[in-house]
Image (cartoon, coloured by chain):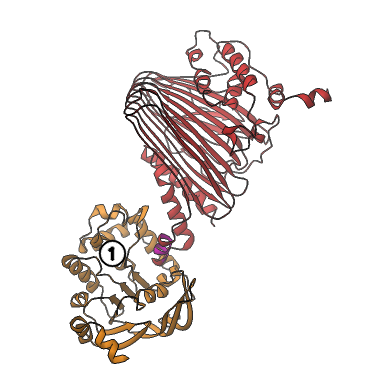
């Protein structure tokens, strides 16, 4: 046995610890995904796409335990009228969740959905598979193969309130893989909220199919879990005149890799991805990796990522806009900026444009900077204490990303959360 | 009110002495003006008094109502009653003017152990003061000084002064970049704040601002020192003859 273990690859070692759910409509997709993972192998340090982020703790067979903390924050979105879907340690909790019936929407648990005629067959693992090219994302394929739980949401109309997936954690060792699929029919609309600590280690996939004239808004908070390691993936495909907007707030956690892969396949569609991240300490590592493909005419995409890093924290941004041949009148915008509050913190950015159409407007920019000393003095000269002035300027720096949250109440909640984080982590 | 004795200041990073022994006493209720050629140290004096980084005090002292200013942080000086109207007000994208004003007012109140203003109270006062300075609601909502014209920026400085009600106001080249109408408006704002208990130090190149904000005392500063002090007529003398005569007279 010992000899065999030595020869085992990390991919095999990981797979050996996992059980694939058997049977039902997802069976074929899971087996395909397993074959993909085995062919690709889990990411290693030498992979180009993992140049700035060490995948070690995400790919090793056993998750590193993460201590539980008493909630030192108020819970986000508590004041919002929403439909709650609760996962505890990565497992759906029906008692803690609301009744899952809501007009204009059908919600099922992945673990329960077994009918062979299920719509999920056309989505589960499909967008993930599309997203493997040209850049492999083996952790997402691993998720498709082994995710034991998640939700399938079919949006046929305009539900009266947002759906909120809430994560809770009671175990220090929970190693969770969740896979959510969302299908918006033509003209349908959904706001999805996600928040709460998922697990000591979390591998998440969210596949979103946005049909013509449909609109999807996504606001998630990755916080309240100080030691979590997470690799999340969003795969979205957009139809004609559809809208996709996703905003992520990240505070705390030690290792977070957020992949977002969007395909604009219908004309006049808009995709906005944004993130505001605040990180404190040498252990903090946050990576936003975005790939947006324009494959239709007159589409707009925006990437707005802001990171505040202090006490040796590391931030990474890899963002790409690919404009395919024929994707004329593309309007692509990408900005990634970091505010480094000390010399020990670092921000690594790799913005990329690849354009095969001749009538497009694409811009990208990336900056790293410190607090503006003139602005700081101006505020202090008016009596604002140093720490308050620093916080004000930090929030102002993050504001462009937070403004991507369309709903004013949600935006205020996000801003409030950032402000209270800054207060707690006073320099 | 403001007492400066033998103040000597050099640049922190360079071996360059800017102020070479400044003496100045400003009494409550009085307006003093400092005039002087470029590079005489006027703006440096205002920055050092308000606590900007980059300067090193090598001698002398400065106090406000007997309290040593030079040992305090900028925000402590502000809470003690010192206010500097900037020559170049700083633009702060992302921070709303109203938020900024309210944060400043309440931070000072808190530092002095006074009760903070409620949102409603603050709104009422700020609206009234803004109206006097012809600052519209839109300017209050916009980020601090972002996209403001030169005149709007200076009016915004005076609005801050009006809201913060300092004891000692320093106006650094408040007339720079203003046309006559804008200057009048700013001057009216300043004059409205002239009270028995408040001192003013108006730093300017030109006499024209002093037509609108009438000083009690005028000082001429050159090469880091105050070289001549007189009444309002001194400003007229500068206007008519330039600084050359005064510089020659002192030399």
Magenta stretch holds residue A313 = no
Q: In what element is the residue under mark 1?
A: helix
Shade representing chain B: orange
Residue B196 spot, x, y in % from top left: 28, 80
Number of marks present in the image shown = 1
Is residue A75 something that shows in the picture? no
Q: Looking at the image, which is closer to me, A222 or A235? A: A235
Residue A109 spot, x, y in % from top left: 54, 20
Which chain is red in the rendering?
A: A
Left or right: B86, with A388 as reference point: left
Q: Residue furthest top?
A: A116
Is residue A286 something that shows in the picture? yes
- Give the residue at mark 1: B159
Q: Is residue A104 above or below residue B215?
A: above
Residue B207 spot, x, y in % from top left: 21, 78
Magenta stretch holds residue A379 = yes
Left or right: B50, with A172 as reference point: left
Q: Is residue A146 above or below residue A362?
A: above
- Chain containing the residue with disc 1: B
Q: What is the magenta segment's predominant secondary structure?
A: helix
Q: Identify the magenta region.
A: A375-380
For the C terminus of chain A, which image quadrant? bottom right
């Amino acid at each position: 046995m010992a000899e065999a273990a030595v020869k085992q690859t990390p991919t095999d070692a990981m797979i050996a610890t996992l059980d694939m759910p058997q049977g039902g409509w997802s069976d074929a997709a899971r087996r395909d995904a397993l074959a993909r993972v085995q062919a690709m192998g889990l990411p290693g340090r030498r992979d180009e796409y993992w140049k700035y982020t060490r995948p070690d703790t995400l790919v090793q067979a056993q998750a590193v335990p993460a201590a539980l903390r008493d909630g030192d924050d108020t819970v986000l979105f508590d004041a919002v009228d929403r439909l709650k879907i609760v996962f505890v340690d990565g497992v759906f909790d029906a008692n803690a969740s609301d009744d899952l019936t809501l007009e204009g929407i059908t919600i099922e648990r992945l673990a329960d959905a077994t009918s062979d005629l299920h719509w999920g067959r056309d989505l589960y693992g499909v967008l993930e598979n599309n997203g493997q090219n040209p850049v492999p994302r083996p952790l997402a394929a691993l998720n498709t193969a082994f995710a034991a739980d998640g939700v399938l949401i079919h949006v046929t109309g305009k539900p009266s309130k947002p759906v909120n997936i809430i994560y809770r954690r009671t175990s220090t060792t929970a190693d969770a893989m969740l896979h959510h699929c969302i299908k918006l029919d033509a003209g349908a609309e959904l706001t999805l909220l996600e928040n709460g600590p998922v697990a000591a280690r979390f591998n998440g996939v969210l596949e979103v199919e946005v049909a013509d004239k449909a609109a999807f808004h996504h606001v998630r908070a990755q916080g309240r879990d100080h030691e979590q390691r997470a690799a999340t993936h969003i795969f979205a495909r957009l139809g004609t005149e559809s809208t996709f907007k996703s905003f992520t707030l990240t505070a705390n956690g030690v290792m977070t890799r957020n992949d977002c892969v969007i395909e604009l396949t219908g004309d006049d569609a808009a995709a906005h991805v944004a993130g505001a991240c605040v990180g404190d300490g040498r252990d903090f590592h946050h990576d936003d990796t975005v790939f947006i493909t324009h494959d239709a005419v007159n589409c707009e995409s925006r990437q707005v990522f802001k990171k505040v890093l202090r006490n040796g924290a590391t931030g990474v941004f890899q963002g790409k806009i690919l404009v395919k041949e024929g994707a004329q009148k593309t309007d692509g915008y990408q900005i990634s900026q970091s505010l480094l509050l000390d010399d020990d913190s670092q921000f690594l950015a790799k913005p990329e444009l690849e354009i095969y159409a001749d009538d497009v407007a694409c811009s990208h920019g990336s900056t790293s900077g410190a607090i503006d000393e003139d602005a700081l003095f101006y505020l202090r000269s008016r009596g604002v204490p140093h720490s308050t002035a620093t916080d004000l300027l930090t929030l102002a720096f993050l504001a462009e990303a937070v403004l991507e949250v369309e709903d004013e109440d949600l935006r205020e909640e996000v801003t409030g959360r950032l402000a209270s984080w800054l207060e707690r982590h006073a320099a | 009110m403001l007492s400066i004795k033998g103040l000597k200041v050099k640049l922190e990073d360079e071996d360059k002495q800017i102020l070479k022994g400044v003496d100045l006493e400003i009494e409550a209720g009085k307006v003093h003006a400092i005039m002087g050629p470029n590079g005489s140290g006027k703006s440096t004096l205002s920055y050092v008094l308000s606590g900007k980084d980059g300067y090193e005090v090598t001698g002398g002292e400065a106090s406000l109502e007997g309290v040593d200013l030079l040992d305090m942080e900028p925000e402590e000086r502000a809470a003690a009653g010192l206010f500097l109207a900037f020559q170049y007000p700083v633009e702060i994208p992302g921070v709303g003017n109203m938020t900024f004003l309210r944060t400043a007012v309440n931070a000072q109140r808190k530092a002095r152990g006074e009760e903070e203003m409620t949102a409603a109270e603050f709104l009422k006062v700020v609206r009234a003061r803004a109206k006097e300075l012809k600052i519209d609601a839109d300017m209050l909502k916009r980020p601090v000084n972002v996209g403001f014209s030169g005149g709007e920026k200076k009016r915004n400085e005076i609005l801050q002064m009006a809201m913060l009600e300092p004891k000692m106001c320093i106006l650094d080249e408040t007339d720079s970049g203003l046309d006559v109408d804008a200057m009048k408006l700013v001057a009216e704002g300043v004059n409205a704040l002239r009270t028995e208990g408040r001192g003013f130090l108006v730093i300017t190149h030109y006499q024209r601002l002093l037509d609108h904000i009438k000083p009690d005392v005028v000082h001429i500063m050159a090469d880091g020192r105050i070289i001549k002090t007189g009444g309002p007529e001194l400003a007229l003398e500068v206007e008519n003859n330039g600084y050359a005569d005064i510089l020659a007279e002192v030399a």
